[in-house]
Amino acid sequence: MIEITNLAKRYKNATAVSSVSLVAQDGMVTGLLGPNGAGKTTTLRAISGLLKPDAGGVRVDGLDVSIDPSGVRRRLGVLPETVGLYDHLTVCEHLMYAGELNGLAAESLNRRVQVMLDRFALSPLSSRRASTLSLGQKRRVAMARILVHEPANVVLDEPTSGLDVLSAREVRREVRRLADSGRAVLFSSHVMPEVSAVCDRVVVMSRGLVVAEGTPGEIMASAGGGSLEDAFVKLIGSDEGLN
Amino acid sequence: MWNQTFAILRKESREIWRDRRSLGSGLFYGIWGPLVMALALTALARDRGSDAPLDLAVSGANQAPSLMAFLSERQVANVQAPSDSIAEVRARRLPVALVISNDYGADFRRARPATVTLVYDGSWTQSRSKAERVKSLLGEYARRVNDTRLILRGVSPTAITALEVAERDLATPAGRAATVLALLPIFVLLAAFIGGMSVAADLTAGERERGSLESLLLNPASRLTIVLGKWAAASVVGLATVALTIGVSHAMLRHPRVQAIDLPVGLSGADALQMALVLAPLTLFASALQILIGLLAKTYKEAQTQLSLLTFLPMLPGFLFAFGSLQPAEWMLWVPMVGQHVAMSDIVRGEILSGGRSMAMAASSLLGTAAFVAMATGLLGRESTLRRFGG
């Protein structure tokens, strides 16, 4: 479970997040929805402790990230915006490296890497170098990499951006599977149909604030009907930054 | 923590090995540097100095048979001069030529000053040194003739010799080789900085620029673990470069053609080992500094620029010593690079360093290393390090 309370983060000349509180429950997919610049990435980075908030705090499974960042990271699998694979390492080596950094012992490491290769259909690509992979394949490696250590909480920053329809659908299926296996999944997006199809709960952000929260159905109703997209535009006050 | 450090070291080494580019500069330096020095040394071996035979182009030789006989006694062979010696020397096809005037024979017989013209190019080293030698031989011949003429007239030659200037030029090929070998300390010292340089830039600013730093920091591995792993990887490459440079230098100085110069200094196996032991802690120091600079740089390009500027740092003590503004002193032991520079020069001269001295140098370098690692760890923990790129 991921709990964010009254998070605020200011950069030198701009406020990225004014005050954000949200909870990502175990076994649920929580969508973080908002236009570009709403503060989604800042919020997600604060969860892993990469950014230190000016106010408020983050707890993951009850651990405070400002006190025990390593403990929190062990319970987290975070997919950042940039895939960031190493061109000269093979697919298998990426997974091994991630496992080693997470402190997996040799025997469970090999087993977990094999499970991940199978689950993300990467076995045939296992000894290919990352530089030779397509974007969709790279995203699958990145997903597999953050799940090697079986984290109880998963944070995904725009995991489908730039992917073709089939690859994006594959990612959404995986997101669903993660929640169904009891994990807390928090993922950000600005693609409406995706959010309404996958998420159990949606948190809508705009200009550093949470402007709405609930199931996709509740949000559509509260904004006065229509599609989620219409509701979204109504909630944030304009369609600026949507695409 | 150590398992994770080793995991990072293993992964970085694998990448460095596969990329090759950053590895290349160190290898290039370690092999080509000593080879260039070997070439300079063998060139010196060929130039055997004052007793080597010299071909001198002489025009009008038949005017001065006794001078010619004298010169050939002194290993200077008289070869037929080209028709226009001045043009030949000007075009640098001929280093030196002697033109004997048409009146030489007549003047000489009447004991009047006989004219010979020495044609050379003072801005051309080879020409100047040969002319120097011919000039001194001509002087010697003139003195001899003077002496004979004075004796014939009943005057003792010593009466007109108020001063006897004895010259002893101690420059031997080995002595000149020593000036080349004086570069060796600077040279091996630089290896400690050059080897890990591009690797350090790759592991820090390069990792950030490729967008993989965020993923790395999202792992539970501590910041110190990450810095240590990267520093170790850069150090391995640095140490390999140092070993290679010393090894090739050692082999080069053992080569028969270099040995033929009869060098006053050498680099025995024990000397080479001593050098490596002195330079190892300095290499760790250099890598830690390079990792720190790489993390501070805004871009990969900036990191590369700053790291290449950093290589001037170890050259600095060498320059200061060369220009005489610095004399070896006790305190230098405690200054990384300066202490090692003095030590390298002593080793080249065949000195054996005391244990205490080596320990002092290692201690100061390792202290600096720890400070840089700590600073780099602090920097990696700061969110600005991540934000500086792709915020």
Image: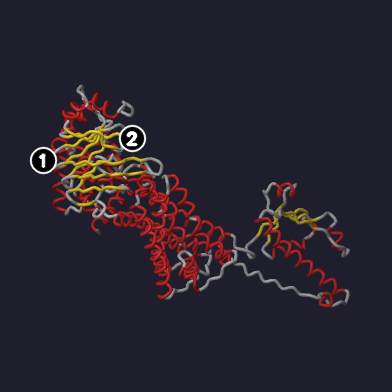
Q: Nearer the viewer, mark 2 or mark 1?
A: 2
Front residue of this view, candidates A15 and A31: A15
Taking the image as shown, residue A41 lies to the left or right of residue B325, namely left
Taking the image as shown, residue B332 lies to the left or right of residue A157, namely right
Front residue of this view, candidates B331 and B62: B331
Q: CA distance from mark 2 to mark 1?
A: 32 Å
Taking the image as shown, residue A94 lies to the left or right of residue B17, namely left
Q: Position of residue A203 (x, y in %)?
A: 22, 35
- The image shows residue B4, relative to residue A28, as above or below, that is below
Q: What residue lies at 76% left-to-right and 75% top-to-bottom? A: B164
Q: Secondary structure at mark 1?
A: loop
- The image shows residue A206, relative to residue B207, as above or below, that is above
* Location of residue B372 (image quadrant): bottom left
Q: Can you tell which mark lies on residue A37?
A: 2
Q: Which image quadrant: the N terminus of chain B?
A: bottom left
* Location of residue B128 (image quadrant): bottom right
Three-letter amino acid code of the residue under disc 2: Gly
Circle 1 is placed at which residue position?
A181
Residue at the left extreme, as displayed: A181
Q: Secondary structure at mark 2?
A: loop
Front residue of this view, candidates B256 and A162: A162
Q: Which image quadrant: the C terminus of chain B?
A: top left
Q: Position of residue A124 (x, y in %)?
A: 18, 37
* Location of residue A95 (image quadrant): top left
Q: What residue lies at 84% left-to-right and 59% top-to-bottom? A: B105
Q: Can you tell which mark lies on residue B376?
A: none
- The image shows residue A77, relative to residue B368, as above or below, that is above
Three-letter amino acid code of the residue under disc 1: Ser
Q: Position of residue B135 (x, y in %)?
A: 74, 62
The first of marks 2 and 1 along the sequence is 2
